[in-house]
Image (cartoon, rainbow, N blue to C red):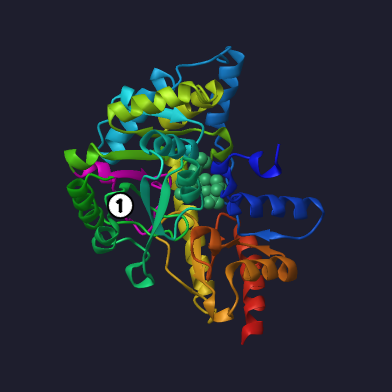
Amino acid sequence: MRIDTRIAERLKKIHPSSTLSVTSKVKQLKSEGYDVISFAAGEPDFDTPDFIKDAAISAIRSGFTKYTQTSGTLELKKLISNKFKKDNFLNYSPDQICVSCGAKHSIFNALLSLLNAKDEVLIPVPYWVSYPEMVNICEGTARFVKTSYKDNFKITAQDLEKHITPGVKALIINSPSNPTGVVYTKDELQDLADICVKKNIFVISDEIYEKLIYDNLKHFSIASLNKDIYNLTITINGLSKSYSMTGWRIGYLGGPQDIVEAICKLQDHSTSNPTSIAQKAAEAALNGGDDFTRNIASEFQKRRDYCISRLKVMKKINYIVPQGAFYVFCDISKTGLDSKSASYELLNEKYLALIPGEGFGKDDYVRISFAASQEQLEKGLDRLESWLNKFG
Ligand code: PMP
Ligand code: GLU
């Protein structure tokens, strides 16, 4: 067999995940004894709460270790349905919900269920690294929609309208956003929803950072705005960020019943159910109230404030103050370096790890994660400042 036919065409243009590869490089350097400060983390640095761990342990002890319904247990889906109602004003019955192995898996399922080959998906730039790659794997076409610093990197109704062609099937929105931390207002979502309804475009609304939101801002779910947009939206969420459960791999989606049925069929023949034990842990999390999440959100707000107070005096850096998530997306164009070179230098000269903006569609930016302790933040920002000094 010729070498170039060994790998399927659909995978040839896929790049490794820049977020995951920097994270594994940091782990390697740390294991070799280097004093690396990592601002690369895409996960909260808090431990999963004990009451959640205990639920998983008792699931194992009581033998809850077998297959469950593919889309998740009815108990868990009922809890998710209640969560959607209470937090998001969304009515998704349990059979409109599919629980999967992380929100990443839910997004992938949604795309694979919606897209025919060459269908176009509008992705506002900057975007989370995996969206375009997932569209590519599904043999769709990622169409990037530029946003501007002056619009806080949010896609406007005019931006959206300009990019609509007959080939466009869906739009991905992510609020609060990774990597910028910006949050869409209800009015902004309403404007986008009106166009999507008018043009019959599906929305994949990634709301994974919903609960990590600052300055008393409110998160809105686009699907809750009216019946028409509800019928076109797949709402994505999960427990990774809000309950510090990244390793447990529980994400979920709610959507129109026909689409969710298709997604369940897909999951029947791919992963089957998400881990039974993690589902019991997720039930405990959703039954356990919001205290843990509120506490970590308030801790993240303090760290955000600290980071901003330091970045404010670094003349070579520009940024938008994040309103949610745990990232600051920093414009480093004044250094004259592209994002990979800047990140490479920072790691090799200062042992500071950040994620290059290239993977998010902005090669003159780097992403700082403030999911790190105060001590690490202080040390890391000192290193960033001293590196920037060489640029005058
Ligand atoms: N969406 C965004 C924007 C993310 O940053 C992440 C983090 N990995 C995910 C989805 C997926 O989260 P998970 O698969 O861990 O639930
Ligand atoms: N979402 C996180 C990040 O952007 C975790 C890593 C990943 O899944 O890409 O860093």
Q: In the rendered image of this protein, does residue 329 appear above or below residue 392?
A: above
Most extreme residue toward the bottom is 392
Question: Residue 214: within the magenta?
Answer: yes
Assign the C terminus to one quadrant of the image: bottom right
Q: Name the residue at 57% across, 12% down.
A: 62
Q: Residue 25 at what x, y percent from top left?
A: 71, 53
* Extreme residue toward the top, this view: 63
- Judge whether 79 appears above or below 300 on screen: above
Residue 148: % across, % down:
37, 69
Residue most extreme to the right: 32
Give the magenta-colored segment's residue range: 202-225
Residue topped by disc 1: 218
Q: Label 1 amino acid?
A: Lys
Residue at the location (24% across, 59% down)?
A: 161
Residue shown at 54%/74% (left/top)?
332
Quadrant for residue 96, please give it: top left
- How crowded is the residue under tag 1: few (<14 C-alpha within 10 Å), some, or many (20+)? few
* Residue 214 locus on image (x, y percent): 39, 57
Q: Examine the rendering and report whether any part of residue 313 can be seen.
A: yes
Q: Taking 232 as reference, is 383 left or right? A: right
At numbered mark 1, what does the secondary structure look like: helix, strand or loop? loop
- Res 173 visible: no
Q: Which residue shows up at 44% across the image and 26% down it?
A: 266
> Relative to 53, does residue 195 appear above or below in the rendering?
below
Secondary structure that dominates the magenta span: loop
Report the quarter where the N terminus lies: top right
Residue 63, given in percent of the width and then of the height, sits at 58, 12
